[in-house]
Image (cartoon, rainbow, N blue to C red):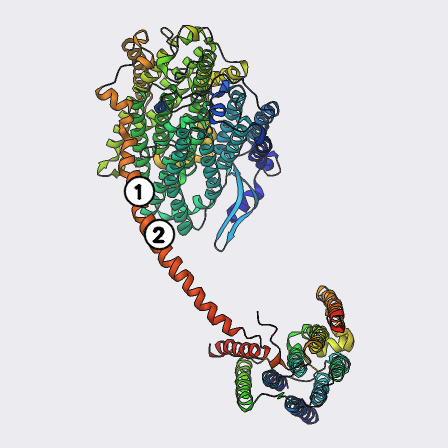
Amino acid sequence: MPNFFYQVNFYLFGLIAIGSAIAFVTRRSPVAAALWLVNTMFCLAVLYVMLEAQFIGVIQVLVYAGAIMVVFLFVVMLLNLGEPSEIADIRGKWGKLVAALLGIVLLAQVAALSGKRMPEPFIPGTGYDAQAVRDLGAVGSVAQPLFNEYLLAFELTSILLLVAIVGAVVIGRRRQIDAR
Amino acid sequence: MLAESLALSAVLFSIGAIGVLTRRNAIVIFMCVELMLNAVNLTFVALSKVYGMAGQVFVIFVMTVAAAEAAVGLAIIIAIFRHKQTVNLENINLLKG
Amino acid sequence: MLLQEATRGVHPLSGSIAEWVWLIPLLPFLGFLINGWLSITSAAHVGPKDPSAAGHDAAGHGDDHGHDSGGGAHGDDHHPVVRHKYAGLVSIVGPAVLLLSFGLTLAIFMAMLGVSREAPFVRTLFSWIPAGDLHVDAALQVDPLSMVMTLVVTGVGTLIHLFSVGYMQDDPGYPRYFAYLNLFVSFMLVLVLGASYPVLFVGWEGVGLCSYLLIGFWFTDKANADAGKKAFIVNRIGDFGFLVAMFLMFANFGALDFLGVSAAAPGAGFNSPLVTTICLFLFLGCAGKSAQIPLYVWLPDAMAGPTPVSALIHAATMVTAGVYLIARSAFLFSLAPVAQLTVAFVGGLTALFAATIGLKQWDIKKVLAYSTVSQLGYMFVGVGVGAYTAGVFHLVTHAFFKALLFLGSGSVIFAMHRAYHATHNHDDAQDMRNMGGLRRYMPVTFILMWIATLAIAGIPVFAGFFSKDEILGAVFARAHESTLAQVSWLGIPGSALLFIIYAMGLTAALLTAIYMTRMMLYTFHGPNRSGEKEQSHLAEAPWVMTGPLVVLGVLSLFGGWLNLPALLPVGPIGVLDHWLEPVVGTATNAVTGGAAEVAHGTEWALIGAAVAIAVAGILIAIVRLKPERLVPKAQAPEEHGIERVLLNKYYVDELYDRVVVRPTVWISRNVLATGVDEGIIDKLLVTWVGTGIPRLFGWFGSRLQSGQVGTYAWVLLIGVIAVLGAFTLR
């Protein structure tokens, strides 16, 4: 079993993540929601590090919290949506109720499924990833499979990004017809 | 801690799903989808302890896809906003054939 | 599979020229592609514009009307002969590919001579049907039996291709003809070389297709097209049997390749219902392809095709595929004595039945057609009583002399037609009543045809004598001591049935001698009945046609040396017996129980009886038939009594028409067409169900398509929950 301090930290950041996520879906203001989501992502980054995926944790902060969420905020500000909009952003009472019910059912099902075949207990410092980190370092342990077994997929994602860039530019461009 | 990680992942995923269902603002719905992706990433990372480093490699791919999706999706939202002056999905039914 | 791999690994032929066996069927296929391409590209220029001009005016096409159509109906005969513009190229490509195949076959044959032939050499090309337990390779098998068949097919095939160059080259469809002919040979080679039943079946169906195409080669004449369809449809009945046999084999033995089935078959047990059923269904297939009772009716009609086609497909090779199949499946048949007796009895009955019809036909090709049916019956008697070598031996000699007879008749028809064409006579060029005395005009054909006639009649020294005698001797021997003699067939003791078959065989031999002599007398002897003017135009065919005839004549003379009986003091004894021993030896021994053949004294007596009967048949024909008294077809009197029945082939076609064809047509028209198709399918299914349900779904579906992403997300999540629920509850 991991030590007490580790467990406390794990639960602490897990609960913060859940709390931030709940806050994220309930805030009316898009900017507030986005900031709560950033908070969730930071917590997840901490958990990644604790799960001995240090590289992923760093990427989480850099790419998700740092880049993707900033893009979201940019768009919110660009479209001037910072204020809670007058029209109902959140569905009514029945909508919330049914959605919550569905969420709980989903959760119960996931729990029931995962409870069926849970892998062996977790001990920090053991397992594939810990071994890989010891052998190759935090970055190397991810890079090794990425550039060997998954090289083709990696190259394909670069094409995906290129297409996404071109697509975003083309779609987001102000057209002649809009200017008129 | 593996069980807890997976449970946390399930909870975050469900919260994200509820968000997708209850919100009407396209940008917020987008962010909820990002939360769901994050929940899946947590599962990948947690299980990479048991099944090997492929899980973490997949997290990288998921992030890449999420970035591409955010770029294109937000561009679409901007285009729609220019056209309709709203991002409320109730008022957008372009998918109707 | 394992067995195959094992035999491949150590086989002495691996690495030799036998690895190239796949080229043997591929070469004629290339010929098909080239000739077919020439045919298609030039179709626009010389296609049959006017049916009468295309089908009737090329001097060489041989006017193959069915006898019934009366042989009139020529178009305007004043068209000049226009050769196809690629005729020269086709004349080279068509026979050349076959010659190359023949050369390759000879090379492989030579390679086989020096090595052990106990196990077959299987050349696996690729995995053809890998579907669960069913695994079929596209594989070819080189063993003594397939080599004999390949040599016959390519050898006789080459000769007939050469003959065709002379016979067909003035036909407007010349490239098409050679394309079909090459394709036929290609499929026939797949048939005889295939290493499994499915591969064999590919060839089996392929030759059926080519047979159909070539019977209906002059398709502008409806009778010819109908004959093609008849052959195709009758063959489907047989193919049904073949398919069921394959299904049964796969279901019970788990294999379809010859090695696998032969390894698994003994497990089913001797005389077990399973093996008997499989063999009977296989025989149904053989009866269709090889024209045995009750499916023989297509072969006489198949004479509507060009005469070289009749020689190649409907005498020498394709129709013997059934005999080959039974010899190939010897390991199965020797386990099923009841099925063997069925094969032998049907063979004997067919031999006798067809011979009687042959007695009274006037169309020279019809005589030969019934003769072929009859001789095929002999082969089935041979393979039926477990004398597989004798059956294959008769197959080979028959290929020689019957090809010779057909090509000879083709040469006669060619000459007759040319004479009629030159004098604008519209009479039937195939009717023997219009011939007579041709020996003066066509001496080479005359001599060679007599050689073939003596061979088929069973006169000693000629090829047919040895093979026919071997079959009859085997039947006689089996009646005394074999597994067949011990079982009973429909209540008849096996030994008694075998004596009956023997008697039928002897009677058929007598009739064979009679009708063949009759054909020769009416065609070549007596006065000429074709007319004054026509006589001056009768002449021998060109060398490209007589050349193959001479080669076949030599083969008909000496073909018997392939398998001389042991009691002769001279010559190589039992060459074919020895050669085929690895393939059919075990099966033959299983039938005979290892017992020796009949004593030499008895054998001499049997031979004496057979020769006496053959000579008697010829003498009867010479004494009784007077070609001088015969009148041309146009003035021929009405036939009466039994002669009329024979002339009309026992009215079997009419019987099939009443019993099978008309009821089928009636049901199709009145029940299936108006009731099922128009009533149920058109009205109920198409009109009501077909338009109602789509409308309902369309209305419902259009409600779902709100265009609201939020709604879609809800539906999506409910779907996810449903799927996960299915997992959870499992």
In the drawing, does residue B94 fall left or right of residue C669? Answer: right
Name the chain letter of the residue that bears numbered label 1: C
Q: Which amino acid, mark 2? A: Glu
| CA separation in Å, label 1 and label 2 | 18 Å
Can you give x and y, in whole percent of width and height, for residue C645 in the image?
Answer: 25, 24
- The mark total stands at 2
**Image quarter of residue A168:** bottom right
Can you give x and y, in whole percent of width and height, for residue C643 in the image?
Answer: 25, 20
| Callouts 1 and 2 close, C-beta under 8 Å | no
Q: Secondary structure at mark 2?
A: helix
Disc 2 packing (10 Å; few <14; some 14–19; many ≥20): some
The answer to whether any part of residue A13 appears in the image is yes
In the drawing, does residue C142 fall left or right of residue C335? Answer: right
Query: Measured along the vertical axis of the image, is residue C106 above or below residue B49?
Result: above
Name the chain letter of the residue that bears numbered label 2: C
Report the residue at 76% width, 75% height from top: A135
The answer to whether any part of residue C563 appears in the image is no
Q: Which amino acid, mark 1? A: Thr
Residue toward you, A147 or C602? A147
Report the residue at 36% width, 20% height from top: C363
The residue pinned by badge 2 equals C678
Q: Secondary structure at mark 1?
A: helix
Q: Which mark is residue C664?
A: 1
**Image quarter of residue C712:** bottom right
Query: Measured along the vertical axis of the image, is residue C724 above or below residue C458?
Result: below
Q: Earlier in the sequence, mark 1 or mark 2?
A: 1
Disc 1 packing (10 Å; few <14; some 14–19; many ≥20): few
Can you give x and y, in whole percent of width and height, for residue C162 in the image?
Answer: 54, 21
